[in-house]
Image: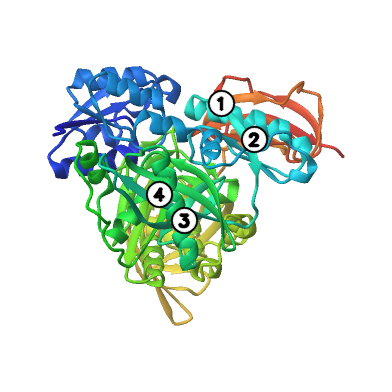
Amino acid sequence: MITSVLVANRGEIACRIFRTCGELGIRTVAVHSDADANALHTRVADTAVRLPGAAPAETYLRGDLIVKAAVAAGADAVHPGYGFLSENADFARAVLDAGLVWIGPPPEAIEAMASKTRAKELMGLEPLGEVSAADLPVLVKAAAGGGGRGMRIVRRLEELSAALEGARAEAASAFGDGEVFVEPYIENGRHVEVQVLADTHGTVWTLGTRDCSLQRRHQKVIEEAPAPGLSQGLEEELRTLAVRAARAVSYVGAGTVEFLVAGDKAHFLEMNTRLQVEHPVTEAVFGVDLVALQIAVAEGQPLAGSPPHARGHAVEARLYAEDPARDWAPQTGTLHRLAVPGVRLDTGYEDGDEIGVHYDPMLAKAVAHAPTRAQAIRRLAGALERATIHGPTTNRSLLVDSLRHEEFTTAAMDTAFYDRHLTSLTSAPPDPYAPLAAALADAHGRSRFGGWRNVPSQPQVKRYELAGEEIEVRYRHTREGLETVDGTRVVHADAGLVVLEADGVRRRFEVSRHGDEVYVGPTALKALPRFPDPRTQHAPGSLLAPMPGTVVKIADGLAAGAKVEAGEPIVWLEAMKMQHRISAPVAGTLSVLHAVVGAQVAVGALLAVVEEDQ
């Protein structure tokens, strides 16, 4: 029997596994980088072991250090989670060689499937060799790992070389393996996968299908089970292929076989030899705990002859600290409050935790289960809309609008969903009453007697930044209380609640403040000083760091005085395991270049200035 498990991972992943271990009475061991010294997964574990450093290559990708940590902490088993070393055969062997139980598939199975190139060969497929114009569009893809990292779509041959270089660098950083390959890119397909679970006694379960078509940067955003709209014949084909893949490598444990579905035809993508981020939707539909089953299989227990029956529908949305309207730029800072009512919430954060720059920006996964797909979608969208999220910008509004989009509600979505709809989904105007409610809450309790009391008609002024725009709000103190200048009636105003009435409709606004950050319901504002500091102003054409990160590249041969074209890449930043390209906003002259390769930069740091041609 397993009595103590080390999870070779971090954040939400580790917390999820620790929860099941606690329910089973199994002691837990966390590992953490210096950046994660006070992370939630280290706080909830029974024991925590430090991995010196911050970068993944120094810490969570160091299998030798993790095995030593397991032995030192007295663990008798290792669970790899998902990501990092979860699909690394050498790490699995090192765990077994140390006399520990490996809660995962045999190293030989990982080896056969961990490389997407070898997996395709096993299924009778081959990646593209020499790419010609007739092959376009193509997808450059990391051979190891997943999560959308190390992937690039190429539509023009002259872009292939840069795509290969960027994908190799990103894959090496995320997985410690820079091997990439090229395959045809299928437009407007659906991403459908099959959950498999196999024991050491020859039983292989398939636990239904999942649809993961809503993706950004090839990383899943919204997932559901079962995949809607599949014909019975296609479902049977997918399950048959999944079982064939598992049996071909004598698979043991939980795994996922992924396909791209176009029409009624399935194209094999890969087999992920690990638990998936989206596994909770399968758990909800089948009423199982996949982590508990992984542990039981690792202990040698047999699965039942057939899996449980599916019930209802489940939808999961990944809540990210990112700004979808700004090329999905990851965000950092303090997460003051996170609460999503009425649904399952898997997270690696608590109120007051810091969201750093070193790792994936996912804050949580929200999962709703209901008897029908429509009910599950409605429940999840409503929960996210009512959620309290105070801190860095998130994709919450995008998730709500995506779940309610006609293409999604009618199951007509595909992997190009955000290519078509991102602009419309991120252009909704913010609540026009939010700045007024913020100002009235701030004014509550302030004395209306002062130097201005003899000029009661003079309004008070507050300034806020909302969705990148500066907004000015005016109101008055009167003997009856606070009064707006636009005729909106103030029904109630205190520091935490404002009720306004306009055109006979009353609206309630809950208001919270953290420093100069103000939250009016789901709307985030920044309180601005009455007189801006001129030192914070930047010249036109300034390129500012959209997030904290490391400068990893400057365009070849670029120096101050060079001519650049609009959209020409200038600087590459790496943050949260992704590379972000900073391009010239206009055609002109590069008058300033402050960026230095290897330098750490803060959000808003001046990287360069492009003076527009006149």
Q: Secondary structure at mark 4?
A: helix
Q: Say what amino acid the circle numbered 3 marks.
A: Leu
> Which image quadrant for residue 201?
top left
Marks 4 and 2, the one that precedes in the sequence: 4
Q: Which residue is mark 2?
A: 581
User: Which residue is depicted at the point 72% across and 35% down?
Assistant: 160
Alpha-carbon span between mark 4 and mark 1: 30 Å
Q: Secondary structure at mark 3?
A: helix
Q: Secondary structure at mark 1?
A: loop
Q: Is residue 293 left or right of residue 598?
A: left
Colour mapping: rainbow
* Looking at the image, residue 357 lies above or below residue 276: above
Decide if residue 529 is in sight here: no
x and y percentages locating residue 61 in the rendered image = 41, 24
Q: Which residue is mark 4?
A: 243
Q: Mark 4 near mark 3, Cβ–Cβ under 8 Å?
A: no
Q: Quadrant of the N terminus?
A: top left
User: Which residue is depicted at the point 32% across and 71% down?
Assistant: 371
Alpha-carbon span between mark 4 and mark 3: 9 Å
Alpha-carbon span between mark 4 and mark 2: 41 Å
Alpha-carbon span between mark 2 and mark 3: 38 Å
Q: Mark 4 near mark 1, Cβ–Cβ under 8 Å?
A: no
Marks 2 and 3, the one that precedes in the sequence: 3
Marks 4 and 1, the one that precedes in the sequence: 1
Q: Which residue is mark 1?
A: 178
Alpha-carbon span between mark 1 and mark 3: 30 Å
Q: Residues within 10 Å of mark 4 (few under 14, many from 20)?
A: many
